[in-house]
Image: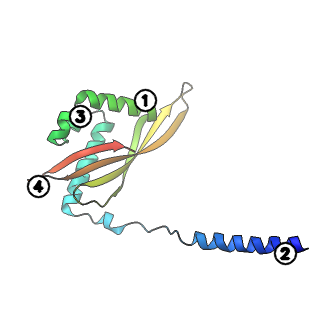
Amino acid sequence: MKNASRFSALAAVLLAGAVSACTTIRELPPDPADAELSVEQAEEREYSRKLLEAFLKNDASGFIALLSPEMKEEFGKDKFELSRKVITETLGKPVSFSYVTALEHIAITPYIWKVRFVLKNKEDKEYYSEALFRVLAGHDTKGEVIIVGFNFL
C-alpha cells in the first residue's frame, strides 16, 4: 500500500510538471504584416517569385538576368544547369509552389517559398516531397531590386 501511495504522489508531481511545461510554448498567429508589404517589399517578393519560376521552368537566361552583377559572375548557365539537375534528380519534377513569408532582416529580406516536387519510381508510382526556397533580395543604391542569394533549404 505504501508503494502505491508513493507511486500516486510521484505520478501527480510528474503530471503537474508536464502540464506546466506544455503551457510555456505557444503557437503564434499568422503575421498580418505579411499581407501588407511595403511597395519595396512587394517589388522584391515579385522578383523572388520570378527567380523561382525561372528555376522551375528551366529558364537559365531568365534566372541569371534577375541576379545582381556579382551573382551573375559567380552563377552562370553551367552552375544553373548543374544545380537544377541535382535538385530534380533528388526531389523530382517541380509541380507547384507557394509563398510562405518574408523574414525580418536589416538590409536584405529573405523571402521563403514552398516548392512541391513529384518523383516517379520504375513502376510509375508517384512520391511527393516539399522543400523551401529562400531568396535574399534588397535594393541597390539606385533603388533597383537586386537578388544577392538563393538556396533550397
Report the residue marked by disc 2.
5
Q: CA distance from mark 4 to mark 1?
A: 38 Å
Instruction: Look at label 3 and name its amino acid.
Output: Phe
Residue at image x 28%, y 32%?
80
Report the residue marked by disc 4.
143
Q: CA distance from mark 4 to mark 3?
A: 23 Å
Can you give x and y, in whole percent of width and height, for residue 24 in the image? 54, 71
Instruction: Look at label 1 and name its amino acid.
Output: Glu
Instruction: Look at label 4 and name its amino acid.
Output: Gly
Query: Residue 31 vs residue 78: left or right?
Result: right
Answer with mark 4 or mark 1, whichever residue precedes in sequence. Answer: 1
Answer with mark 1 or mark 2, whichever residue precedes in sequence. Answer: 2
Can you give x and y, in whole percent of width and height, for residue 151 in the image? 33, 42
Residue 89 in which image quadrant = top left
Foreground disc of the pair 1, 2? 2
Report the residue marked by disc 1.
89
Q: Badge 3, how many Cα within 10 Å: few under 14, some, many 20+?
A: some
Query: Residue 1 vs residue 119: left or right?
Result: right
Report the residue marked by disc 3.
75
Can you give x and y, in whole percent of width and height, for residue 34 in the image? 32, 63
Foreground disc of the pair 4, 2? 2
Residue 7 in which image quadrant = bottom right
Q: Badge 2, how many Cα within 10 Å: few under 14, some, many 20+?
A: few
Q: Badge 1, how many Cα within 10 Å: few under 14, some, many 20+?
A: few
